């Protein structure tokens, strides 16, 4: 497969993502910068974490107004696979490729720690190597990760299986104490209704090798190339 | 032409920044019922600029924010 890793001014997980795709997955990967107007010839486009354009105005909004932002929309509308991690997830909501928005964490602090997550939908190209309801552990690192979507929209999303990941406890229970940032219904990751665009706040690229203490993240990447 | 846009979190939406400021003010002994923290964007634009389009397309997210143009 040929992957693109999007680089906006302020992206800082771009090299981690590139490393996982090239060195651990053994796939072809290129960086594309924010002035890129067309995404031709790629099988998957990844928006990595970071602080695009300093997160000014709202996290992700300035990145969404770049030529690359338009190219991502065009690519996604043609059915291309798009994965947004952390700041990439924020950008995908600002591009309206994913429903909802990411707001300041409920407790106002920047969170940098591990969380448990439950796989709510394992039928996507991004999650097919996971089991349904499997509990995994990934790191989070964000100040604006509180997922919000109006309740009426959420009902439709639930019916379509668009809620892909939820914060849970070690045993897979979804409860408020397992919710690190105050997200609606513990939501940590969602997809579009077609299932080709997926965004999540945790960082799967940081959990791919034993040396880091866990490798649940690599399963997501293997799902893509399966 | 100078334009000022006031952007505030929508009513009813949790505003952690406003809550933190309110708690600090209450601790300081002030009788404060509510605090909302938003932002101001000052623009200098050409005559005939479609301010509403500019604001709605770029500056606010209508899901969670409301705005006033001055």
Image (cartoon, rainbow, N blue to C red):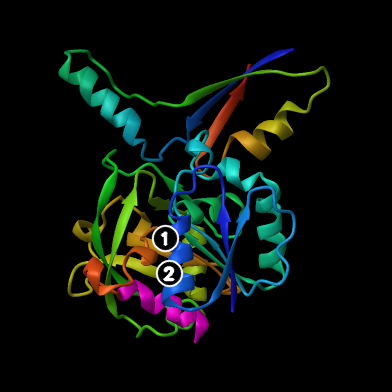
User: Is B22 rendered above or below residue A185?
Assistant: above
Say which residue appears at 66% left-offset and 66% top-offset: A76
Q: Is residue A223 magenta?
A: yes
**Image location of residue B12, percent across then percent down:** 41, 39
Queried whether the magenta region covers residue B22, the answer comes back as: no
Residue A126 seen in this snapshot: yes
Quadrant (top left, top right, bottom left, bottom right) of the N terminus of chain A: bottom right
Numbered mark located on residue A64 in the image: none
Task: Give the residue drawn at x 67%, y 52%.
Answer: A68
- Indicate the secondary structure of the residue bearing disc 2: helix
Q: Which residues are magenta?
A: A216-226
Residue ranking furthest to the front? A23
A13 or A130, which lies in front? A13
Question: Regarding mark 1 in the picture, which secondary structure is present there?
Answer: helix
Q: Quadrant of residue A108?
A: top left
Per the rendering, the mark at residue A20 is 2
Residue A4: image x %, image y %? 59, 65
Q: Answer yes or no: do the residues labelled 2 and 1 have beta carbons within 8 Å? A: yes
Q: Main secondary structure of the magenta part?
A: helix
Question: In the image shown, does A157 or A71 lie closer to the viewer?
Answer: A71
Q: CA distance from mark 2 to mark 1?
A: 6 Å
x and y percentages locating residue B14 in the rendered image: 36, 40
Figure label count: 2
Per the image, the residue denoted by label 1 is: A16
* Chain identifier of the residue bearing label 2 in the image: A
Is the residue A33 above or below the residue B68 in the image?
Answer: below
Q: Could you tell me which chain the residue with mark 1 belongs to?
A: A
Residue A188, image quadrant? bottom left
Q: Residue at x 41, y 85 (%)?
A: A129
Q: Is residue B35 left or right of residue A191?
A: left
């Amino acid at each position: 497969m040929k992957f693109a890793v999007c680089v906006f001014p302020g992206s800082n997980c771009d090299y981690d993502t590139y490393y996982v795709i090239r060195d651990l997955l053994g796939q072809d990967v290129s960086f594309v910068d924010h002035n890129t107007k067309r995404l031709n010839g790629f099988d998957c486009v990844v928006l990595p974490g970071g602080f695009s354009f300093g997160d000014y105005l709202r996290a992700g909004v300035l990145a969404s107004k770049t030529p690359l932002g338009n190219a991502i929309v065009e690519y996604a509308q043609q059915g291309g696979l798009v994965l947004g991690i952390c700041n990439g997830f924020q950008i995908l909501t600002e591009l309206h490729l994913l429903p909802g928005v990411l707001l300041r964490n409920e407790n106002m602090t920047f969170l940098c720690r591990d969380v448990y997550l439950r796989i709510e939908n394992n039928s996507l190209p991004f999650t097919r190597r996971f089991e349904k309801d499997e509990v995994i552990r990934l790191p989070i690192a964000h100040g604006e990760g509180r997922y919000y979507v109006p309740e009426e929209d959420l009902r439709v999303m639930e019916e379509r299986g668009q809620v892909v990941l939820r914060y849970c406890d070690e045993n897979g229970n979804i409860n408020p104490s397992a919710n690190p940032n105050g997200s609606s219904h513990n939501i940590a990751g969602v997809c579009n209704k077609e299932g080709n665009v997926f965004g999540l706040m945790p960082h799967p690229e940081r959990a791919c090798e034993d040396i880091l203490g866990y490798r649940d993240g690599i399963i997501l990447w293997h799902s893509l190339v399966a | 032409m100078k334009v000022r846009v006031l952007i505030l979190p929508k009513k009813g939406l949790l505003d952690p920044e406003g809550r933190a400021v309110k708690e600090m003010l209450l601790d300081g002994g002030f009788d404060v019922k509510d605090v909302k923290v938003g932002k101001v964007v000052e623009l200098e634009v050409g005559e005939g600029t479609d301010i509403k389009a500019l604001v709605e397309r770029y500056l606010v997210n209508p899901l969670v924010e409301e705005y006033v143009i001055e």
